[in-house]
Amino acid sequence: MDPASAARSGNRVLEAQSTRGLLLSTASRLASFPGGDATFFSRLGFRYGTIVETFRRLYGSVPEVEGYLERLALILLECYRDRPDRLKDSDSRREKAQAQGRAWFLEPGLTAYMAYADRFAGNLEGFRRRLPWLKELGIDIVHLMPFFRSHEGNNDGGYAVSDYLGIDPRFGDRDSLVGLADELHEKGMFLAADLVLNHSSDDHAWALAAKAGEGKYRSYYYVYPDREMPDRFESAMPQVFPETAPGNFTFVPELDAWVMTVFHDFQWDLNWSNPEVFLEMLRILLGLANMGVDLLRLDAVPYLWKKPGTSCQNLEEAHVIVRLLKACADIVAPGVAFLAEAIVQPSEIVRYLDSGGLAGEARVEECQLAYHASLMALLWEALATRKVGLLSATFGSETRLPPGTAWLSYARCHDDIGLGYDEAKIREVGFTPGPHRRFLLDFYSGRFPGSFARGRLFMENPVTGDARISGTCASLCGLESAVDGEETELALRRIELLYGLVSSLVGIPMVFSGDELASLNDYGYQSEAEHAEDNRWMHRPRMDWEAAERKAAEGTREARIFHSIRHFFSLRRGIPALAQDAGFRVLASGSENVLLVQRCPRSEDERRVAVAANFSPEERAFPLAALGPGFGQSPLDLLSGRAVTTFGGMAILPAYGLSWLAEA
Ligand code: GLC
Ligand code: GLC
């Protein structure tokens, strides 16, 4: 062994010893508090090394780091003590299943639904009464948009939180949330909720205390007396809301200082380099878990750590924070999973699921799920261009996820569609990045001649020419612009194509509330003071229960789309090749309009399935031979229940047709 590695391994031994010493002294101190049991101490022992290592990495330079570690351990014990027994029982079951490689979120067939409790059903109680709707659609995971007390007036859809564990009385109270979680669990469903950890509202108690001059709370935020640091930061930081909230800092007269506000001026970025902030948020995270939340959506997670001279996104410390949070959650609530809301380049998204070990070796735990923002944006690109080149090339070269993790796949959510494509790939398939982006923006805002889409540009940045897209799935698919039966039919097929692909390409499919009824853009937001400036509200419609009744009437668009999505979901449940973590391989279809993807089940005893999708408004064909051996001359289309139409060795897909072809 050379001296350097000898020193390194010596250090490790020393570190291990001091960690063990720390663990022993922590454990003996904790033993004098009630609530700890053998399960708690064994989980603590198992994770303590990671906790100490990650905590020191973040806060090693802070004086009295051991004192913080002790406070952290006490928080874990208190939250464990407070965790209801039924959740502890479910943790044990989930832990066991996970050890056998079957975490609850990998249960084949799982689906998700994202909704605003108030816009869907008035409040949490109302939501609970509407669960049969979701059951009928075939939903398992319900993500409720933020329902905590938030900023007065504009609150960014609840993402400016004033009280992280206090439910907004408009939605109900703690009991209504716990009751909803219990009922979901009884029905075999799961609850997802947001942890808005990058920023608080400027009327959160911490911000109010800071404004009142309390130094402790001032240091919870990034506060600067003059423009020197803000200018250093700004030189490299992009802007999230350039139109309505330009810049990344806001002057706050009560503080006589500049505060970092990456999102809106009323969303103050929390300073995670302060260990007090970490401990506060840890308690909140575990508090949410103890209310019965199964999946925590880590809002805006790439933004957690800031360093001047960088984009302040995806910094290594942001990952270390998530690792530390996960190690802590695994002690108190190991059944709870994390969902990364990281709407960044694909190669960066993947790092929230698999960031490699601290020294680049073994995989370490962060999030278990992440939104597949790249697939979402690619599906819209293919729909506009009618060509599958960029989708095939990007999806085909996608990094495989590590075992135990999965994508959340979707066509629409409450946010805008960002055009985050890989520029090299755009060139590779024969487009030029700038004009291509311009085309897509023109297309989806309906400016491009002949475009079927009726969307709006979101946050147009005149300096960079960047913009994103707002609009509901149905309006972007042409249902709003359709003037006759033929155009309506094409629009409905586009919606089915997108939802059918989201259900079969990879990951857990998610429905954005309203899409199951093909809801059109809601322009009413323009006359609502707190929404008027933010056109994302056009695609966050209030649930139209009158329209919902039409799902029972044959021939209506509501019936058509509801039953199509339901069909995708129920069929998928019985097809092992379409499990969220089954493999996939992009095949060459020989047609620029036809996407061909083979799904490979985890067990070799199960049949493979080929997903074939035609992005053209005209009939297209591809050679059956492209499916490879095993699919035969007239494969069964599981979606229609009939053999696919063939002609002279070619499979024929109608306009916007989708088939799930089974291996013979
Ligand atoms: C997330 C939310 C988005 C919100 C932002 C700020 O990205 O999805 O709606 O504007 O965070 O919290
Ligand atoms: C940016 C952020 C994302 C957020 C969105 C809101 O894209 O990266 O987190 O959802 O803005 O529009």
Image (tube, helix red, strand yellow):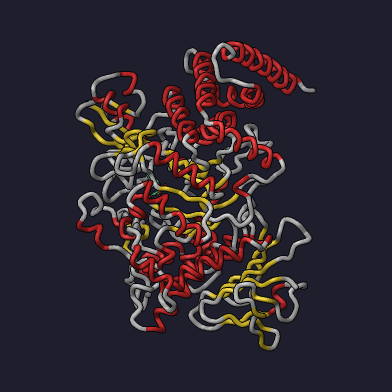
- Which residue is outermost to the bottom? 648
Residue 363 is left or right of residue 628, and the answer is: left
Q: Tell me the quadrant of the picture where the C terminus can be found.
A: bottom right
Q: Tell me the quadrant of the picture where the N terminus can be found.
A: top right
When the figure is inspected, residue 56 is found, relative to residue 545, above or below; the finding is above
Counting from the top left corner in percent of width and height, residue 347 is at: 56, 49
Residue drawn at (56%, 35%), measured in percent from left and top? 86
In-front residue for pair 186/144: 186
Residue drawn at (34%, 57%), measured in percent from left and top? 540
Quadrant location of residue 388? bottom right
- Is residue 261 visible in the rendered image? The answer is no
Quadrant location of residue 327? top right
- Is residue 644 visible in the rendered image? The answer is yes
Residue drawn at (59%, 13%), measured in percent from left and top? 31
Counting from the top left corner in percent of width and height, residue 263 is at: 33, 42
In-front residue for pair 15/47: 47
When the figure is inspected, residue 162 is found, relative to residue 412, above or below; the finding is above
Quadrant location of residue 458? bottom left
Counting from the top left corner in percent of width and height, residue 51 is at: 58, 25
Query: How many numbered circles does the render carry?
Result: 0
Counting from the top left corner in percent of width and height, residue 261 is at: 32, 37
When the figure is inspected, residue 563 is found, relative to residue 282, above or below; the finding is below
Residue 186 is left or right of residue 586, and the answer is: left
